[in-house]
Structures are given as C-alpha cells and as structure tokens.
Image (tube, grey):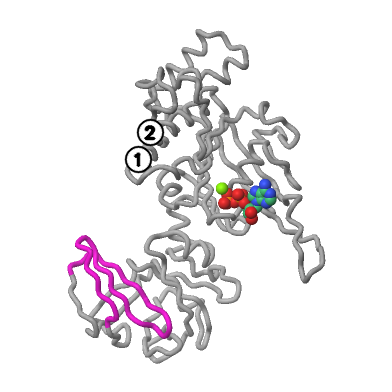
Amino acid sequence: MAQLTLKNIYKRYDNTEKKVFGKQKAQHDYAVKDLSFTCKDNSFIGILGPSGCGKSTTLRMIAGLEKITAGQMFIDDVCINELLPKDRNIGLAFEDYALYPPLTVYDNLAFNLKAKSIPSERIKEAIDRVAPLLKVDEFLMMKPSGLSGGQKQRVNIARAIVRQPGLLLLDEPLSHLDGKMRQTLRQEIKRMHREIKCTTIIVTHDQIEAMSMADTIIIMKDGELQQMGSPLEVYDQPANEFVAGFIGEPPMNLLPSIIVKTQEGFFFTFANSELRVKVPDRYNAVVSDTMALTLGVRPVDVIITDKHSSTPVPVAVYENFGDERRISVRVGEDLLNITTAEEVFYKHGDIIHLAFNSEKTHLFDTKTGLCIKGAIGKKQ
Ligand code: ADP
Ligand code: MG
C-alpha cells in the first residue's frame, strides 16, 4: 500500500529541439508540464487524455523508467526521484504483454520472484493467491503462444501484482482487446483492485475505461493537468471547455453565444440563427446583456418542450435508434444535438421549442475556456 505524490513535475525529452524558421532553436517543448497530484493509499486513479498528452511519460517517470526534468515525486513521505525502478515496489503492466514465449504461464509469473531468490514454496503461494483473481489458474501450464489476447493480458497483469507491489501501474492494458473482452476485463480489474488493496493507476485514452474503473480521474491535455475529480465531478462539473467536450458520449454541445436581456429575462442567442433559449434563472447573477460566452449543454440535457421557453426552431435531423432518439437543430453554422429516451417522432422541418436543464447547463469563458465562476453546472 502506498500514497503517491507528484509535485510540479516537468519532463522534456532531450531530442525535442526543433528547427524553427530554418534555425536550430531549443524548443522548451515539455511532454509533461507542472504536474502535481496525490494518489491516496489504495485509490484507483485513471489518467485520461488524448494520444500524445503525456500519460505514458507520466507513468514511466513514476516507474523510474524515464528521468524527471524537474519536480519531485514521493511514495508516502520518501522522495523517489533517485530510486532505481526495482527499489520502488511498483508493479507494471503495459499494453504490450512482453511475456517470455519459451516459459509457461506459471514460470512467467514466477520469473521476477525467482530472480529475487524467493524460495519456490513462497512463489507457489503467491501464484496460487493471484492466479484465481485474474482467472489465469486454468492455463498455468500453457505457453503464451497458445493464449488469446485477453488471456495474455490477464497473465501480464497477474505478473505485475504477484510481487505484492505498493503501486500498480497499468498503461492502456486493454487497448489490444475486442469490445466484449475489454468489458469483462474492466470488471475483473476493478474486482482485483478491491481484493488486493493496492494503489492503482491506469492510463487510457478511453473515457469509458477510466470512468468505469477509477474512483478518481485525472484529465490531461498537452502535458498539463486539466482536472482531477471523481467520475461524476468531471462529468457534471467540468472545469473547462476541454474537459466538457472530452468527457461524455455523444459529446457536449459547445456553442458560442451572446446573452440578450429582454423583459422576460436573459436569453442565449447565437450568430446567424433566430434561436433564442431562456437562460436558467440561477445564472442571472453571472450573465449580463451582450455578454459573450460558450454555452455547454449535453444532448441529453436539451429538453424539447411545447412551452415557449425558446423561439420555434425546425428539426434538421431526426434519427431513431430504438432505445433513444437523436434530434438535431441548426444553430448558425453548428448543429445542436439532442438525445432523448422518450418516444417522440419528428420529421425534417417539424417545429419544436427547446429548454435547457438548468442544473446541467455550463457556461465557459470564451477566451480562457474556463468554467465561469458561479456557473458550475450544479446547484452550489
Ligand atoms: P500518451 O501516452 O499520452 O499518448 P506520451 O507520454 O507517449 O503520450 O507522449 C507525450 C509527448 O512526448 C508526445 O509529444 C510524444 O511524441 C513525446 N515523446 C514520448 N516519448 C518520447 C521519446 N522517447 N522521445 C521524444 N519524445 C517522446
Ligand atoms: Mg501512451
């Protein structure tokens, strides 16, 4: 068990000097910038972000496989900056299984323990304990070549935890697997985490993976932390436009809007569109006439209503997926997407009125992209 703390961590790869305007110029191009966070003992952290945002770099620095350019890392109260990987008490499982092909699954699991001269009875005990957790006990005597991708990945993770590490690091462990297997393994990793009680960090670009397994999510972009919070917090209270657009499927509608004040109160208006939608009353203190902002509202939080809370607007697209319906209306150059589980039927051109779920409407500063203070999408 271990608590991990990162304090102002930077990483610049030595080979990232780029040619700019024909001259060789040192680009202070950091793969990770000023990253600080704490993973509590026994927590399950998901580091989530698009490809290239610095997730693997962060994990490799924690493992000691990559040098830190600046900053400090601690396991409990011990600074680990200078500790060798083998002395960090860390279990690692990467996307690439890297199992030893000539060895049986049992010997693959035993390999690192044997290298530490642990007696064979103790090794057997450790494998007997871990193998059922990841359901690898049925094929301990097989060679890796006879296993499916899902089975290999289970062995890979079992090998990482057989040494009872304080910290388990998983880098995209499910990305080679097909949909059904990913779902099964997600559930098994979660169960395994509950049973072995080990601080676990999973790195993934797949939000479903992070949201379903982790108790805390760290969202990164361009090497920087965007938000850290529970899955529900990052979904319901995104700190900025990036997080708002990244979490949730289908993505949140993010529309540039100008606020207009009328006798009936404030309305969202949109360039090149007749559409006006009432601003939820609880935002009256943060909006003002002619204010420009970005409105964020998830498709599921746009309500089709016969009340005149908006100007009439024609349906541009109607799709029925059986379990849900998707309706889009044109707003200037953009489409505003709506999803509903209600059995509503429209055709192109039908006139509807819209309202926004006031609890779930988000306002962002157009320039900074940050959530406007006092406008977090939840009652305070
Ligand atoms: P992610 O895992 O989020 O996809 P990475 O941590 O692998 O991102 O990469 C972050 C950035 O660092 C990217 O711009 C990538 O090109 C760069 N990078 C990663 N590894 C190296 C390396 N060994 N040398 C130079 N640049 C690297
Ligand atoms: Mg990666």
- Position above or below: 192 against 255: above
Q: Main secondary structure of the magenta part?
A: strand
Q: Residue at x 81, y 63 (%)?
A: 25
Q: Which mark is residue 148?
A: 2
Q: Is residue 262 left or right of residue 12?
A: left
The picture places residue 23, in percent across and down from the top left corner, at 82, 67
Q: Residues within 10 Å of mark 1 (few under 14, many from 20)?
A: some
Q: Which mark is residue 267?
A: none
Q: Are marks 1 and 2 in contact (CB under 8 Å)?
A: yes
- Position above or below: 20 against 202: below
Question: Given the image, on which type of amino acid does mark 2 rest?
Answer: Ser
Q: Earlier in the sequence, mark 1 or mark 2?
A: 2
- Which region of the structure is painted magenta? 315-343
Residue 232 lies in the magenta stretch: no
Return the residue at label 1: 181
- Residue 319, quarter of picture: bottom left
Q: Between label 1 and label 2, give the one nearer the viewer.
A: 2
Residue 344, visible in the rendered structure = yes
Question: Tag 1's secondary structure?
Answer: helix
Q: Nearer the viewer, residue 230 or 338?
A: 338
- Position above or below: 76 against 232: above
- Ligand 2 under 8 Å from disc 1 Cβ: no
Question: Given the image, on which type of amino acid does mark 1 rest?
Answer: Met
The picture places residue 52, in percent across and down from the top left corner, at 59, 55
- Residue 38, quarter of picture: top right
Q: Nearer the viewer, residue 364 or 374?
A: 364
Q: Residue at x 18, y 72 (%)?
A: 344
